[in-house]
Amino acid sequence: MADRAGHQTGRLTPRLALAALVLGWACSAGAASLTLRVRTPAGTPVEDAAVVLDPVNGTPPQSHGRATIEQRDRDFVPYLTIVQKGTAVDFPNRDPFKHHVYSFSPAKVFEIKLYAGKPANPVVFDQPGEVALGCNIHDWMEAHVLVVDTPWFAKTGADGVARIDRVPPGAYRLRLWHPRQKGAAADIEVDLRRASRHLDLKLEVAPRVIVKKPPLDAGGY
């Protein structure tokens, strides 16, 4: 509903209300930020590492957001998606041929059978955990979804850097995860009650194997 000036009035949607709550909590309490640089033991930046902050005390606010994982040029984009539990994910097919998306991961078993365009219904990731995605038509296609309980998370870019802003001050358990990690990283206790933090972390990951795609006219569809 809008007033005469065109401004929206009435109740906020649940998503906007949650955003206002989190932002208000962060601003009123003196929000902090956490910047991390993740590298291999040899010093190479680690891309697509998930950094997650779980509060030691209390229950984090919940949201039911929306995310998108595309199929483009016979690949999933992005390679890693991090979402809070309850997020609906769309899987639009941007290619001029069909894909068949599936997951057998315990955190989310689903299948979107052979399709073009955008499926009418998104997939809701309603359980925390790691989800591996594949395509029944193109065996080399691979992507990952990490479903978490908290709204405070980020993933590293090509420079190995990730930043989480507007974190309410307090004690947190930092989790570091990567789809190709060679061993689980130990959780780290982080105190954000006094100031923002900068951390350098090490994680050993296997190199990503890039499969050469067959030509479109030779079985590559």
Image: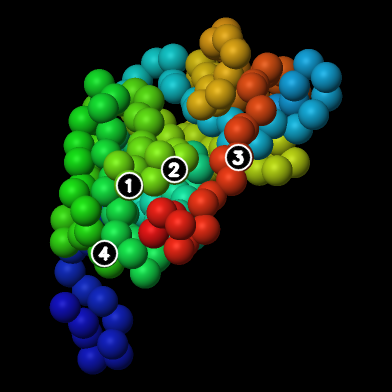
- Labels 2 and 4: the sequence-earlier one: 4
Q: Nearer the viewer, mark 1 or mark 4?
A: 1
Instruction: Quadrant for the N terminus, please.
Output: bottom left
Name the element at disc 3: loop
Q: Is residue 89 visible?
A: no
Q: Give yes or no for contact between labels 3 and 2 (Cβ–Cβ under 8 Å).
A: no
Residue type, numbered disc 1: Ile
Q: Is residue 175 visible?
A: yes
Secondary structure at numbered mark 4: loop
Q: Which mark is residue 116?
A: 4
Residue 205, how many percent across, how many down?
A: 64, 21
Task: Please state which of residues 159 and 115 is positioned toward the viewer in this rendering.
Answer: 115
Q: CA distance from mark 2 to mark 4?
A: 16 Å
Which residue position is annotated with label 1?
A: 137
Q: Circles 2 and 1: CB distance less than 8 Å?
A: no
**Which kind of residue does numbered mark 3 sit on?**
Ile
Mark 2 touching mark 4, by CB under 8 A?
A: no
To which quarter of the image does residue 135 belong? top left
Residue that extends furthest to the right in the rendered view of this protein: 43
Q: Which tag, 1 or 3, sits closer to the chain's start? A: 1
Residue type highlighted by circle 4:
Ala
Report the side of 70 relative to 27 (left or right).
left
Q: Give the left or right position of residue 5, taking residue 170 as reference.
A: left
Find disc 2 in the rendering and name its residue. 141
* Pointer 3 or 4: first along the chain: 4
